[in-house]
Image (cartoon, rainbow, N blue to C red):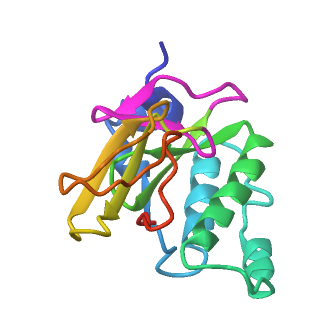
């Protein structure tokens, strides 16, 4: 089995004892602190692997976002990550996300040569290719009856079919969809 360090660190970095934390880019779910930070990080990692990072830029994403009246808060970072994942695939790299359980995107660039990322973890939490299905889903809501905050962390294959609040309020239908009076947190 391939170790995460073998994919995200160069041989020189591994020899020097560089930690995965130092090649991890954290971005809040609402986006970068300064435009271009994510692209600069990705380009730097591609250079570290010895390739020239042509097209590792998110200018096209910024331009498209400016012309999109439907763009909501939190949509832009997803578009950036989708774009960069496609660019990296042509360079033999994979954009990866560490599912740390927060609302921050913890981004890594892995030198994969086109191979799939599977079974990788960091500090006991999964690392997966951006765009691949998460192993777990986080669902949270405020009960419309008693206002209690309810949170579930579910395996991706599990639903909340017929789930109720402790107060008795029905929250989900038999298929696991929220009932009309229930609003999930984003």
- Report x, y in % for residue 98: 43, 44
Is residue 104 in view from this perspective? yes
Give the residue drawn at x 32%, y 69%: 144
- Which residue is pictured at 58% across the width and 80% down the height? 35
In the rendering, at what x and y percent does residue 184 appear?
Answer: 43, 63
Above or below, 156 against 145 in this view is: above
Which range of residues does the magenta coloring cover? 112-132
- Residue 45 at x, y = what percent? 57, 50
Main SS category, magenta section: loop
178 or 33: which is nearer to us?
178
Q: 180 left or right of 148?
A: right
Image coordinates for residue 170, horizontal then vertical, percent: 35, 54
The residue that appears at 33% across and 56% down in the rendered structure is: 102
Res 61 quadrant in image: bottom right
Q: What is the quadrant of residue 83 in the picture?
A: bottom right
Q: Is residue 88 left or right of residue 21?
A: right
Q: Nearer the viewer, residue 24 or 155?
A: 155
**Magenta region includes residue 129:** yes
Q: Residue at x 51, y 73 (%)?
A: 31
42 or 117: nearer the viewer: 117
Residue 58 part of the magenta-drawn span: no
């Amino acid at each position: 089995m391939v170790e995460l360090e073998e994919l995200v660190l160069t041989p020189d970095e591994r020899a020097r004892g560089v930690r995965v934390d130092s090649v991890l880019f954290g971005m809040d779910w609402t986006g970068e602190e300064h435009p271009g930070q994510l692209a600069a990080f990705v380009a730097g990692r591609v250079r570290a692997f010895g390739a020239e990072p042509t097209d590792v830029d998110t200018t096209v994403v910024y331009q498209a976002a400016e012309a999109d009246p439907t763009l909501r808060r939190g949509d832009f970072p997803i578009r950036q990550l989708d774009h960069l994942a496609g660019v990296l695939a042509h360079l033999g790299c994979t954009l990866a996300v560490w599912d740390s359980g927060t609302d921050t995107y913890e981004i890594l660039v892995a030198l994969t040569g086109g191979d799939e990322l599977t079974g990788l973890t960091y500090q006991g939490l999964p690392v997966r290719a951006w765009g691949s299905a998460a192993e777990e889903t986080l669902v949270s809501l405020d009960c419309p009856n008693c206002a209690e905050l309810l949170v579930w962390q579910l395996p991706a294959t599990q639903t909340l079919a017929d789930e109720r609040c402790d107060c008795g309020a029905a929250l989900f239908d038999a298929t696991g969809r929220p009932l009309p009076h229930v609003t999930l947190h984003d």
